[in-house]
Every structure is written in structure tokens, then in C-alpha cells.
Amino acid sequence: MSAPIGLFFGSTTGNTADVAERIARLIGPERVDLHDIIDIAPAAMEDYEYLIVGIPTWDFGEQQEDWLEVWPELDRLKLAGRRCALFGLGDQLGYGEWYLDAMGLLHDKLRAAGAEPVGYWPVQGYDFEGSKALTPDGRYFVGLALDEDSQRAETDGRLEIWVPQVLDAFALD
Ligand SMILES: Cc1cc2nc3c(=O)[nH]c(=O)nc-3n(C[C@H](O)[C@H](O)[C@H](O)COP(=O)(O)O)c2cc1C
């Protein structure tokens, strides 16, 4: 664990894992440690000054299963002073009433642990009915909103905009 950025993700069918690798390539692999949350305790987040955290939503607004497994441990995290960017995967056409709900739930947990969220993302360009991952004014998602089911072609372009914004917010670029 020598890199300044820790990227933690969970993934059931591989989409979030794939995006995590693409983010690492854009940042430069030597600057980021990739951790699948199935293999590591969330307490390892405390070892990093900068965090990127990825979660897909499953089963009508629920957290991905590996995140759900460690969910109670998130209450014990101490992340004061850590900047944290989130990215979420979901399917806005198939599950538009719960689009990216899990990212909203994780955002609230990490903020309660003291993390400072960065990397909010505007809601323009999406078509969904409801989401727990919105800011109170409804203008932003609380992290990067991705959709490998309905808007796969948008993902690379979104990453190319968001990753530099996050590095800027981390004051690393
Ligand atoms: C049974 C099922 C339930 C899902 N429920 C939701 C949901 O409630 N909200 C949402 O935004 N996406 C939902 N999705 C879409 C997944 O989040 C999406 O396919 C995601 O890319 C999966 O990521 P993963 O491959 O990393 O697990 C669901 C997908 C399936 C198959």
C-alpha cells in the first residue's frame, strides 16, 4: 500500500471492476492501489489520504452484495481529512426508480465517517425516475453516474472528464 490513492470497489458481474481498472489506467497505475472489497476489510481505507470508491446498485435499490457484507464495518471507519470520490453503476432504463441508490447510501456512510466528498456530477444527460444518489437540490449526483447497460457508449467520455476533475480536487494534478 504505497500509492497515495486507494480505489475500493465491489462488483458482482464485473462491470464495476472493469471501470475501476479503466480509472486506474487514466490516473496512472503507480498512483493508485486497487482493492476489491471482497478481499479486504474497509478499515484499510484509513491507510489512504485519497479515496475513490465504486459501487453498483442491485436488487431494487440495494447495495452490491460484497459491500452489504461489510456494511456494519463502515460505521466504525475514521476518515476525517480524507477526500473521497464515488462512482456508481446502475441501469437507468431497467431500474429507473432506484438508479444508483447504493452510491447515495455509501456516500452518506463515508461522510458520516468524516470523509470529504468530491467529484459530484451533473444530472443532465440521464433519464431516470428516482435516485438516492442526488444532492438535496437534485442538480448533481454525489459521484460519477455510470450505466453500462443503457449508456455504455458514454462511459469513456465521462471518465475522461471526471478523473481529471477528481485529481484536481485531490490537488494531485
Ligand atoms: C437483478 C438486477 C437488479 C438490479 N437493480 C438495480 C437497481 O436497483 N438500480 C440500478 O441503478 N441498477 C440496478 N441493476 C443494474 C446493475 O447495477 C448494473 O448492471 C451494474 O453494471 C452491475 O455492476 P457489476 O457488474 O459491477 O455488479 C440491477 C441489475 C440486475 C441484474
Image (spheres, rainbow, N blue to C red):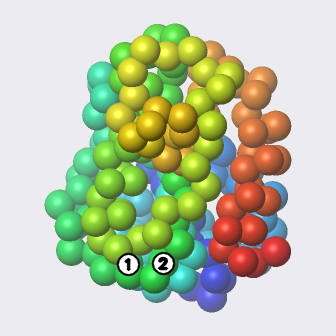
Can residue 75 be seen here? The reply is yes
Which residue carries the number 2 mark? 82
Residue 162 in the image: state x and y as whole percent: 72, 50
Vertical arrangement, residue 40 with respect to residue 99, above or below: below
Dot 2: few (<14), some (14–19), or many (≥20) neighbours within 10 Å?
many
Residue plotted at (63% across, 88% down): 2
Can you tell which quarter of the image residue 98 is in?
top left
On the image, which quarter does residue 157 sit in?
A: top right
Q: Quadrant of the C terminus?
A: bottom right
Vertical order, 156 against 75 (above or below): above
Left or right placement of residue 112 versus residue 136 in this view: left
Mark 2 CB lies closer than 8 A to ligand 1 = no
What is the count of numbered marks? Answer: 2
Q: Is 57 left, or right, of 26 in this rendering?
A: left
Marks 2 and 1, how far apart at CA? 5 Å
Do the residues bearing badges 2 and 1 touch, measured as CB atoms within 8 Å?
A: yes
Q: Residue at x 46, y 11 (%)?
A: 94
Image quarter hosting the N terminus: bottom right
Q: Amino acid at mark 1?
A: Leu
Provide the secondary structure element on which disc 2 rests.
Answer: loop
Residue positioned most to the front: 137
| Residue marked by disc 1 | 79
Dot 2 amino acid type: Arg
Label 1: which secondary element: loop
Counting from the top left corner in percent of width and height, residue 159 is at: 75, 45
- Residue at image x 51%, y 21%? 91
Q: Is residue 172 above or below residue 164?
A: below
